Image (cartoon, rainbow, N blue to C red):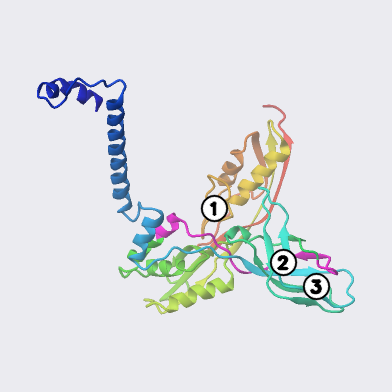
């Protein structure tokens, strides 16, 4: 802009359009020109933004939700995890009331985070009994509260007569979920159109993903249970879905015009993976290195991953030993890994899901660099 003005201002002054030659280095005219250029720049940025937001698969936030509304999709809201914990005691004499609103929690995880849960109903430890199961609801929204078995171990609100608390196998009854991401909503927008073209696979996938808590779907449409059958395998925010979530997806599909009559909604078959090995270290704090390696390995089995750069394993995805190696070798100070388990790639069936069953890492110093 300044170069253009400099080349034409003599001509403009000769024609009487400018009273004097402008000082382009400082002063009020330079300020006015800079303001004009800034405003023009903002206009161009706005036009570029509007053009991008006009395309559903490029748009984001409110613009994306506007496009999704045109195909009757709404961004899924966050939900709270709910389930049950077991309160225990040593002395079993007398009735011990456990009021609603009592708080229990997990110990800090690798990131120092604590997850709290509130008893959803009053209960009583009856005379002669050592334990009672009580329903609880997560204090906060989100799928991070879908904790694993044995993580809830602390009683925050003192309950006289109760000595301990724990969450056991099958404790989770309804998964918590985060607010749907733009990426997930874009995928559902695409499926909404593909599901209208007569391809059953995309229709079923679209219908299943409408339910909060479902984050991945694989449709097995090659007659998995015999001629004319179709299986809808869903992955939840907790991995293997609860029966409540399976029932919700089933009810949602039943309300649609399903093309295939012999369909079934189910969770993936859990395929337990045991990971054990010794980290051979060159330098650094062994405790910190082992903790980071464990955090990265756990992230492979968590969705969404809590570690940047880690893509969680999905339904039917194998667990190559090389992937485990790459995950750990990204930690600084590790020279090598001596695996005790697994010793080869873990093959997962098409309707299965790799589930971390155990994780044990030790360390030793390298004999030489």
Q: Residue 167 colored magenta?
A: yes
Whole-angstrom CA distance, mark 3 to mark 2, is: 12 Å
Q: Label 1: which residue?
A: 312
**Dot 2, how many residues are within 10 Å of its Cα: few (below 14), some (14-19), or many (20+)?**
some
Q: Is residue 213 above or below residue 181?
A: below
Q: Residue 115 colored magenta?
A: no
Q: Earlier in the sequence, mark 1 or mark 3?
A: 3
Which secondary structure lies at badge 2? loop
Nearer-the-camera pick, 322 or 33: 33
**Dot 1, how many residues are within 10 Å of its Cα: few (below 14), some (14-19), or many (20+)?**
some
Splitting the image into 4 quarters, where does residue 57 fall? bottom left
Q: Is residue 282 visible?
A: yes
Q: Earlier in the sequence, mark 3 or mark 2?
A: 3
Tell me where residue 239 appears, x and y as whole percent: 57, 62
Whole-angstrom CA distance, mark 1 to mark 3, is: 37 Å
Nearer-the-camera pick, 44 or 362: 44
How many numbered marks, from 0 up? 3
Tell me where residue 150 appears, x and y as whole percent: 72, 61
**Dot 3, how many residues are within 10 Å of its Cα: few (below 14), some (14-19), or many (20+)?**
some
* Quadrant the N terminus occupies: top left
Tell me what residue is drawn at x 31 percent, y 23 percent. Answer: 27
Q: Label 2: which residue?
A: 168
Nearer-the-camera pick, 288 or 263: 288
Q: Label 3: which residue?
A: 131
Q: Earlier in the sequence, mark 2 or mark 1?
A: 2
Splitting the image into 4 quarters, where does residue 158 fall? bottom right
Left or right: 98 with respect to 190? right
Q: Is residue 231 above or below residue 286?
A: below
Given contact means CB atoms under 8 Å apart, are the residues at marks 3 and 2 in contact? no
Point out the stretch of residues depicted in magenta: 159-187
């Amino acid at each position: 802009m300044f170069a253009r003005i400099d080349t034409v201002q003599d001509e403009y002054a000769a024609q009487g359009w400018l009273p004097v030659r402008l000082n382009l280095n400082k002063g009020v005219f330079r300020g006015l020109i800079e303001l004009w250029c800034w405003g023009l720049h903002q206009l161009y940025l706005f036009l570029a933004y509007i053009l991008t937001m006009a395309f559903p698969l490029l748009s984001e936030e409110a613009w994306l939700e506007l496009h999704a509304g045109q195909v009757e999709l709404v961004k899924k809201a966050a939900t709270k995890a709910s389930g049950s914990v077991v309160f225990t005691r040593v002395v079993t004499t007398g009735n011990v009331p456990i009021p609603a609103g009592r708080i229990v929690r997990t110990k800090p995880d690798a990131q120092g985070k604590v997850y709290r849960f509130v008893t959803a109903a009053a209960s009583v430890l009856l005379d002669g009994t050592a334990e009672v199961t009580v329903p609880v609801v997560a204090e906060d929204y989100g799928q991070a509260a879908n904790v694993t078995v044995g993580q809830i171990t602390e009683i925050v609100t003192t309950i006289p007569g109760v000595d301990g608390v724990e969450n056991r196998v099958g404790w989770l009854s309804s998964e918590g979920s985060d607010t749907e991401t733009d990426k997930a909503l874009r995928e559902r927008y695409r499926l909404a159109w593909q599901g209208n073209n007569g391809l059953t696979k995309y229709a079923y996938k679209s219908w299943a993903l409408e339910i909060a808590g479902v984050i991945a779907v694989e449709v097995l449409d090659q007659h998995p249970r015999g001629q004319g059958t179709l299986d809808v395998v869903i992955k939840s925010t907790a991995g293997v879905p609860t029966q409540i979530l399976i029932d919700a997806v089933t009810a949602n599909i039943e309300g649609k015009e399903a093309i295939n009559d012999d369909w079934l909604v189910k969770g993936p078959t859990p395929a337990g993976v045991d990971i054990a090995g010794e980290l051979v270290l060159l330098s650094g704090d062994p405790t910190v290195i082992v903790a980071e390696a464990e955090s990265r390995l756990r992230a492979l089995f968590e969705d969404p991953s809590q570690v940047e750069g880690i893509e969680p394993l999905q339904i039917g995805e194998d667990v190559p030993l090389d992937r485990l190696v790459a995950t750990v070798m990204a930690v600084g100070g590790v020279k090598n890994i001596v695996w005790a388990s697994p010793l080869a790639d873990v093959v997962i069936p098409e309707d299965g899901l790799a589930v971390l069953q155990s994780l044990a890492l030790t360390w030793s110093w390298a004999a030489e660099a």
